[in-house]
Amino acid sequence: MSATRYAAAPDAARSTRDCTDPWFFVLFNADRTVAPCCWHPPVARLAPGDSLEAALNGAAIKAVRRELLTGRLNAACADCPARGLTDPVSLAKRVQAEMAALRG
Ligand code: SF4
C-alpha cells in the first residue's frame, strides 16, 4: 500500500509552498522542541535557560526559510498537507509584504 499524499507535489513552475509559517509562526512543544508549524519536524530543542529567540534565528530554521525561498524543499515541506504551491518569487513578495505590515 502506498502512502497517501494530501497535497499536490511541487513542479517546475510551482516549486515551493505558499507558506510563511517559518517567519511568522512558532510551535513550542511541551518537550521543549521548537517547530515552524504543526507538520514540520522540530528545528531545535531548548535546554533550561536557552533562549527561544536563538532557536528562531538558528541555522535550522534559516535553512527551512531558504529552502522555501529557493524551491529546494525538504521532505516535510515537499509533502506538506497544509500549504498549496507557488513559485519562489511570489513567496518572497508575500514574506516581504507580511514583514512590512508587521513593521507598520
Ligand atoms: S511543513 Fe508545510 S506548513 Fe510547515 S513550514 Fe513546510 S510548507 Fe510550511
Image: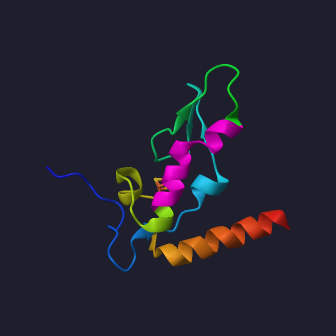
Q: Is residue 50 left or right of residue 6?
A: right
Residue at image location 51% in from the left, 39% down from the top: 43
Q: Position of residue 30 (x, y in %)?
A: 59, 27
Instruction: Tell me what residue is drawn at x 54 percent, y 44 percent.
Output: 59
As for residue 64 lying within the magenta part, the answer is: yes
Along the line of sight, the residue nearer the viewer: 89 or 39: 89
Q: Is residue 75 above or below residue 46?
A: below
- In the image, taking residue 97 as reference, residue 65 lies left or right, namely left
Quadrant of the snapshot with the C terminus: bottom right
- How many numbered marks are there? 0
Q: Residue furthest front?
A: 59
Choose top left, top right, bottom left or bottom right for residue 58: top right
- Furthest-right residue in this view: 104
Give the left or right position of residue 34, taking residue 74 as reference.
right
Main secondary structure found in the magenta portion = helix
Determine whether 29 is above or below 72 in the image.
above
Q: Please state the extent of the stretch shown in magenta in the rendering.
A: 53-67
Whether residue 12 sits left or right of residue 26 in the image: it is: left
Query: In the depicted view, which residue is nearer to us: 52 or 29?
Result: 52
Q: Is residue 13 visible?
A: yes
Residue 38 coordinates in the image, percent (x, y):
51, 46
Q: Is residue 61 magenta?
A: yes
Q: Residue furthest bottom?
A: 13
- The residue at the point 34 percent across, 52 percent down is 75
Classify residue 97 by image quadrant. Answer: bottom right
Specify the farthest residue to the left: 1
Q: Position of residue 32 (x, y in %)?
A: 59, 27
The percent position of residue 52, horizontal first and vertical second, equals 68, 35
User: Can residue 36 be seen by looking at this rendering?
Assistant: no
